[in-house]
Image (cartoon, rainbow, N blue to C red):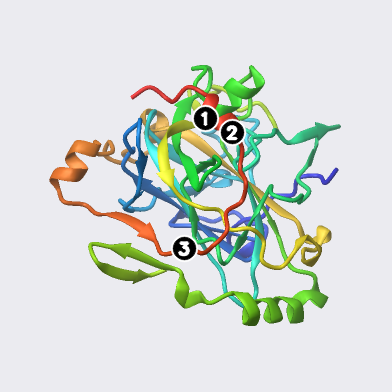
Amino acid sequence: MIPISVYGVDNQRVEPSAEPLKLEHIVVGGLTIGFQRTVRVPQGRINDLPANLGNFPVYRVRDFQSRVPKNWNPEGFFMPMYSQEALWLSFRRNHHDPRALIVAAGNINAITGRPFQIKDKAINVALDEGNYMVVPPQPWLDGWKDRNDKVYQFVAAQLGSGQTVEGQLTGKEDVGGIQLVVYQPKPSAHSRIHQAREADLDEDLLTLECAGGTLGGGDYLGSTRGVSSMGLGRGGEIKQKIYPDPYGLGVWSPDSVQNVTLYLVDSKDFPEITGQQALPTPITVDTYRKLGYPWFGLSDGSWNDTKGSAVFGELKPVDE
């Protein structure tokens, strides 16, 4: 069991600031992670990748300590979402110094569908075959990993609604939020990483295709102080792979783990915490099409895919 330790921007414990910061991304263990607004994709079909409609604003809990639930970790982060709104996660890291990443919501692993094991308030976030991704080559994640080269879109849902993946798999909705766990390579593994890249990886192969062109590729968080906490449910299907670890499990240092929790706040409560207006409501897929926004695909047909879990396909989607 590895006790959770939370790190903030630029991989350092965050000190209080005079002025609250609005962040466009967070950095955990040297890995840059962004949270992107997007359109909710239709049900009943496998969709291409939807476009980025702007960053969700991210804030540090400690900057609003007197206005957030008392049991939020002061070294965590939060951001506003509307119920039924979709998002995807973007990742950025140097190709010569990759990171291993576990993504979870409500302590449910987004690849395996398995909950984190908790004992004596310590959470087992150990790497295991098929429960993590490697950045790079993984550029982003749009949802819960199913089989057959697809994911189910991440969609926000109220805790207590019975619509989060956490609630449907565990029978309880008492965690919520997004959990991010990052591992660094062992110091001795850099030559192995370099050799694997020389043999198998070509960063120019992974390109984003659009319209014939290319672009480079724990604790209870329920309502407290009037703030409604949220989790992630599942939406429609998106064509997307999670690439298997090209370096092997033995590359990653178990002593380098760094973790962060991103709390999700209902947008209607966002002004109560920050004194700022919430973001506009997201557009519908019909408006998305009328505006001529693109859909994207990756030229990764020859790349393998992580197995994922069939359990996500058995869950009910978040109401539209």
Which type of secondary structure does the marked residue at label 3 adopt?
A: loop
Q: Dot 2, crowdedness within 10 Å: few (<14), some or many (≥20)?
A: some
Which amino acid, mark 2? Ala
Determine the residue positioned at 46% across, 77% down. Answer: 204
**Which of pointers 2 and 3 lies earlier in the amino acid sequence?**
3
Which type of secondary structure does the marked residue at label 1 adopt?
A: helix
Question: CA gap, disc 3 to disc 1?
Answer: 23 Å
Q: Are marks 2 and 1 in contact (CB under 8 Å)?
A: yes
Query: Tag on residue 310?
Result: 2
Residue 38 image position (x, y, % from top left): 34, 45
Determine the residue positioned at 41% across, 44% down. Answer: 238
Q: Are marks 2 and 3 in contact (CB under 8 Å)?
A: no
Which amino acid, mark 1? Gly
Which amino acid, mark 3? Asp
Determine the residue positioned at 59% across, 33% down. Answer: 310
**Which of 284/159 is in front?**
284
State the residue position of label 3: 300
Side of 26 where 108 appears, left or right: right
Side of 125 where 148 appears, left or right: left
Side of 198 where 45 appears, left or right: left
Q: Dot 1, crowdedness within 10 Å: few (<14), some or many (≥20)?
A: some
Whether residue 170 is visible, yes or no, is yes
Q: Dot 3, crowdedness within 10 Å: few (<14), some or many (≥20)?
A: some
Which type of secondary structure does the marked residue at label 2 adopt?
A: helix
Numbered marks: total? 3
- Eyeballing the image, is 190 above or below 127? below
State the residue position of label 1: 313
Whether residue 273 is visible, yes or no, is no
